[in-house]
Structure formats: structure tokens, C-alpha cells
Amino acid sequence: MGISAKLLGEDERVIASTRTHWKALIGPVLILLVVVGAASFLAAVIPDGSYQSIGRLVIAAAALVLVALWCAKPFLVWYTATYTLTNRRLITRRGIINRTGRDIPLMRINDVSYEHGLTDRLLRCGTLIIESAGERGQVVLHDVPQVERLHLQMSDLLFGGPEGSRGDGIVGNDPYETEQRTPPRHQPSRPVQRYAEGDDDTLFDSRSYESRNGDDR
């Protein structure tokens, strides 16, 4: 799932990659159940006779067409649509046969927000709204899974670093992630090396100092 590593730039890494929330498949699944049930019922109630086989073939063909249009197609649309966030850009890809995509550099994003109703909150999804400086302006991504987390990751990449600089997009309570983001502590200075008396590398010789003082006297 997501973009191929071959399409990433130098020093570019994937922060998050997801598809549209599975909520988009609730309707097609319900339609599939209704179509299969209705087709089975109609095929069972056709009276015996010379037209029974033809009638069942017609019902089966109609059911297949409905399933292809209202179930298989929405599933393929859901499966082929992806959202990928890297440390440099937001990438969207969609399309079954004709693929379309859009790349939004993070440096051109002015604002990012999200909204979700009661149902979206229960299903942990929502709509991500991105304001960019491009010609299209606003980009709206519907039914994004865990939209709050993706919003937080984008905000961290844009404004989350020290003094408002860009962050690394790592959020959460993972101890490993926390350790990676914790700045290194100040290392104590190395102890001053002591030189033995008479060492050739001694910077200061007490005996020479005493002899010099004697000469001065």
C-alpha cells in the first residue's frame, strides 16, 4: 500500500500511508447482500417449465451487472486510492485504469485542519482539509482513517520542531520514538590528564621552576 520506494526522492521517507476508511465499503456490502438475496429468491420462485432456465439466466446476468456496478467498482475505487505523507510532500493517487495523482510539497501548505461528525468519531475517521499556496488552493481528503493522528503528523512536520521549525513527523507514545526525538544530554567534559613527574610531555616542571627562582635570588 502507498507509493513505491523507487518514486521517493533522496533522503525522502514515508511518514504515513493509508487508504480511504472502510466506511466507504458499507454501502457496497449491503447492496451485495440485497442483490444476492433478491436474485436467489426470484430464481427460486420461477415456476417449472421451459422458461425456467432462461429466467434464471436472466436473473443471474442482471445480478452480476448490479454487483459489478454497485459493488465491485466501488471496491476497486477504494482499493486503488491512497494517501501518502512523506517528510517532503503529500501524495494522493486514485484511479482503476486511468491513474491520477497529485503531489503537494509541504513547503507550500499554509494550513491543515480536520472535521468529523459523530459517526466519524465512532469510526475513527474524518475529513482532512489542506490549504495550499497552489492554483487549486484547498484540497479535501474525505474519510481519512485516524484523521487526528495524520493531522498531528502533518502539523509536526510543518510547525512542530523547536521554535516553530519543521519537525520529523514522529508522534505517539512509542518509547523508541520518544528516545529518537529526545535531544542528547550534555556530555561531561573529559578529566584533565595528569602528567607524571619527569615525563617528557610535562607542560610544567616544578624542579625547573625552583631552579629558576634560585638563580633570580
Image: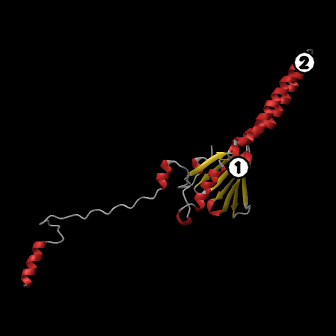
Mark 2 surroundings: few (<14), some (14-19) or many (≥20) residues within 10 A: some
Which of the pair 73/165 is nearer the observer?
165
Residue 98 visible (yes or no): no
Q: Residue 155: horizontal and vertical position, in percent?
A: 61, 58
Residue depicted at 12% across the width and 66% down the height: 197
Of marks 2 and 1, the one in the foreground: 1
**What type is the residue that disc 1 sits on?**
Gly
Residue 118 visible (yes or no): yes
Q: Residue 57: horizontal and vertical position, in percent?
A: 86, 23
The answer to whether 96 is drawn above or below residue 131 in the figure is: above
- Secondary structure beneath disc 2? helix
- Secondary structure beneath disc 1? strand
Which of the pair 146/18 is nearer the observer?
146
- Residue that badge 1 annotates: 126
Query: Is residue 53 found left or right of 24 in the rendered image?
Result: right
The residue positioned farthest toward the top in the image shown: 49
User: Of callouts 2 and 1, which one flags the residue occurring earlier in the amino acid sequence?
Assistant: 2
Mark 1 surroundings: few (<14), some (14-19) or many (≥20) residues within 10 A: many
Query: Is residue 102 found left or right of 189 in the rendered image?
Result: right
Query: Is residue 196 found left or right of 76 in the rendered image?
Result: left
Write down the quadrant of residue 206 in the picture: bottom left
The answer to whether 216 is drawn above or below residue 46 in the figure is: below
Q: Residue 51: horizontal and vertical position, in percent?
A: 92, 18
Name the quarter where the C terminus is drawn.
Answer: bottom left
- Residue that badge 2 annotates: 52
Residue depicted at 70% across the width and 44% down the height: 122
The answer to whether 186 is drawn above or below residue 57 in the figure is: below
Q: Are marks 2 and 1 in contact (CB under 8 Å)?
A: no
